[in-house]
Amino acid sequence: MITIDNITAGYGTKIVLDHFSAQFNDADFCAVMGPNGAGKSTLLRAMAGLQAIQTGSILIDQQNINRFKAKELARQIAFVPQREDLVFEFSVFDTVMLGRNPYQNRWEWANQNDVSLVEKILEQTHLQHLKDRLLSQLSGGELRRTMIARAIAQQTPIILLDEPLANLDIVHQFEIMDILTQLNQNQKVTVVIILHDFPFAIQYAQQTLLMKDGKILHFGNTSQVLTKENVSQCFGLSQEFEYFSNGLVVKK
């Protein structure tokens, strides 16, 4: 369980999250949605321990994340950023193997259990045929799946994903959402994912958190949160737009 208690966070003098509180339970699949600048990415970075908070606390099973050592926190939370800067030219296999670092000593090589696990995850994420390919040789969808596979290799009870569907074709979008659903349902991993597409949230997410201006507008069951009134309030939709129960928004 992740408990976010009255946190304030931002950059310099700019406050992005303003006395923000929320709770994500074990095995939740939660979509985080809202307009640009709502604080979605800052929220996930704070939950991952990558963004300093000025007030409040973030707890994992009642323990403050600030009390975890880096490797301990990496065994609790995996984070998939929206962008991945390719500093080193690793293969797909070696990149996914990096997810095993929290369980290895400083100079320890991967053991057979690590290799077997990574091979299994490559199959699960449909990357087995690409395992020797360099990251720079991958398509956008293949690279995104590789980063998700690396996060899965961490074997954490929580995975946070910042817009993993951005700029991907529809086939890769469904592929990634199916992988996350299997992870959530079969391994009871808590998934918190930033989405912009209402139909994906309605189809896959049990919970949805609607944010605006660094605060929660609505949080709860997806079908109850993503109503026409709530979506219009959050995104400022005018009467020109029609919102349907399947999440489709069209201009009249």
Image (spheres, grey):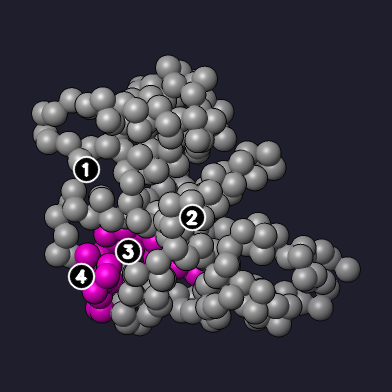
Q: Which residue does the numbered mark 4 point to in the structure image?
A: 64
Q: Are marks 2 and 1 in contact (CB under 8 Å)?
A: no
Q: CA distance from mark 2 to mark 3?
A: 22 Å
The three-letter amino acid code for the residue at tag 1 is Pro
- Can you give x and y, in whole percent of width and height, for residue 110 in the image? 22, 27
Q: Quadrant of residue 236?
A: bottom right
Q: Relative to 167, does residue 4 appear above or below in the rendering?
A: below
N-term mark: 3 or 4: 3
Q: Earlier in the sequence, mark 2 or mark 1?
A: 1
| N-terminal label among 4 and 1 | 4
Residue bearing the label numbered 2: 184
Q: Is residue 32 above or below residue 75?
A: below
Decide which of tag 2 and tag 3 comes sooner along the chain. Answer: 3
- Placement of the N terminus among the 4 image quadrants: bottom left
Callout count: 4
| Amino acid at pointer 2 | Asn
Q: Secondary structure at mark 3?
A: helix
Question: Alpha-carbon distance for marks 2 and 1?
Answer: 21 Å
Q: Is residue 143 visible?
A: no
Query: Residue at the spot x=28%, y=55% of the render?
Result: 76
Dot 2 crowding, Cα within 10 Å, few <14, some 14–19, many 20+: many
Q: Secondary structure at mark 1?
A: helix
Q: Are marks 2 and 3 in contact (CB under 8 Å)?
A: no
- Check disc 2 and report its element: helix, strand or loop: helix
Question: What's drawn in magenta, residue-wise?
Answer: 37-65
* Closer to the camera in the image, 131 or 144: 131
Q: Is residue 66 left or right of residue 3?
A: left
Say what amino acid the circle numbered 4 marks: Asn
Query: Marks 2 and 4, how far apart in space?
Result: 24 Å
